[in-house]
Amino acid sequence: MADAVREIDRPLGQGRGMPRPASRRRIGARAIAGTLAAFAVVAVSGVIALRDKPFRKVAPEVVAMAAKPVEPAAPPAAAPVQPADPVRKPAARAEGPQIIHVQPVETGGQAGIVIQDPSAIGQNLSVAHLPDKALIEESETGPLPIRAADGRRPFDVYARPWSGARGARVAIVIGGLAVSQTGTQEAIARLPAEVTLGFASQGNSIGRWMQEARRRGHEIVMQLPLEPFDYPKVNPGRNTLTVAATPDENLKNLRWALSRTTNYTMVMNYMGARFSADSAAFEPVMAELGRRGVGYLDDGSSARSVAPDLALKDGVPLATGDTAIDAVQDRGAILKRLDELEATARAKGSALGIGSAFGVTVDTVAAWVAEAKRRGIEIVPVSAVANDPEKR
């Protein structure tokens, strides 16, 4: 009876005592093993995907703003980006965008990168001594600065690079170069490249000295003789612009001074307390500077100067001196003035000092600049502290 029950329970088609084929058992085992392996791969992949990227290198954050290209054939320029606390390097290329590391990985955080148009910061120093032909107008007396057809100005193109960062900035202009050949050579060689140099329009070999100064990284300005009080007893020299002269006569003298060399960003008054206080005489001159894309540097010696109002009206970049650093030719007195500049820069953000290429001035400025840098002061070209109406 028990055998009958077992026979009834046995599946149909399978005789008692018939073994299951071995091949069928092997196929089943492989299928089960494959299924388990697939589940294992899926599970491991899910765990890796959900983890906090332990096997991936963190890519640096990129901050960039692309500008529309001016021409189809030209590479697109990138608009400058201002990080909250930038530590930027000076531009290393004259054209095209560049990548600037803002927060190096070595500090422990992610690297911030800015893709920036270097022309917004300044000129490539390797070609700084070469004039841009697009910025030159030929004249009977020599090359004159002019805006390029694309709107670029000598003020922008010939500017020395600087960091562009916020902070205490001091600009120092040392004038009177090209008057004494020995003094000019020593000033160019010994003054730090961040110091701006002013060339006297009546000097000699200005073109040669300009190239030497630019090769060494200096920004330069051209000194313009303007009528002082007590003129002609006190005389700035030949081709002085005067209140009594006609506008055409003054413009002729201005163009003579402008044609003495190239590659300068601004013109600077040499004397001129009377001329700079007369709007009727000064206005045609300022308008000419605006038309040519050249800035104006007022040494700050005259409180009656109308330069700020005229510069704003005519779109001229303007810088005004805060102090004459070497009115007294003494190292201690000069150092005191320079320290005052530093205090002004820390309080207001920037300060501008004016001096002349005397030996004691050159020596003192060179030593002070090295110390000021260690105190966190950035020494910048004069163009970096100018107010530019076209960039308001």
Image (cartoon, rainbow, N blue to C red):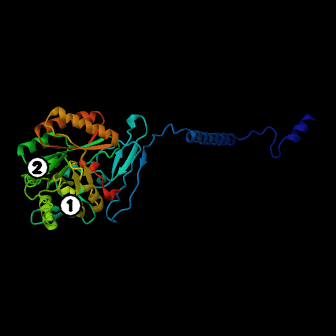
Look at the image and tell me in which quarter the C terminus lies: bottom left
Instruction: Mark 1 and mark 2 in contact? Answer it, CB < 8 Å.
Output: no
Indicate the position of residue 192 as horizontal and vertical percent values.
Answer: 19, 40
Report the side of 73 relative to 336 (left or right).
right
**How far, Cα to Cα, is label 1 from label 2?**
29 Å
Q: Is residue 366 visible?
A: no
For numbered disc 1, what is the local secondary structure?
helix
Q: Which residue is mark 1?
A: 282
Q: Amino acid at mark 1?
A: Phe
The residue positioned 28% from the left and 46% from the top of the image is 162
Quarter location, residue 255? bottom left
Indicate the position of residue 128 as horizontal and vertical percent values.
Answer: 19, 51
Neighbours of disc 2 within 10 Å: few (<14), some (14-19), many (20+): many
Q: Which residue is mark 2?
A: 209
Toward the viewer: 255 or 370? 255
Q: Residue furthest right?
A: 1
Q: Amino acid at mark 2?
A: Trp
Report the side of 290 relative to 182 (left or right).
right
In this rendering, is residue 291 above or below 181? Answer: below
The residue positioned 21% from the left and 54% from the top of the image is 266
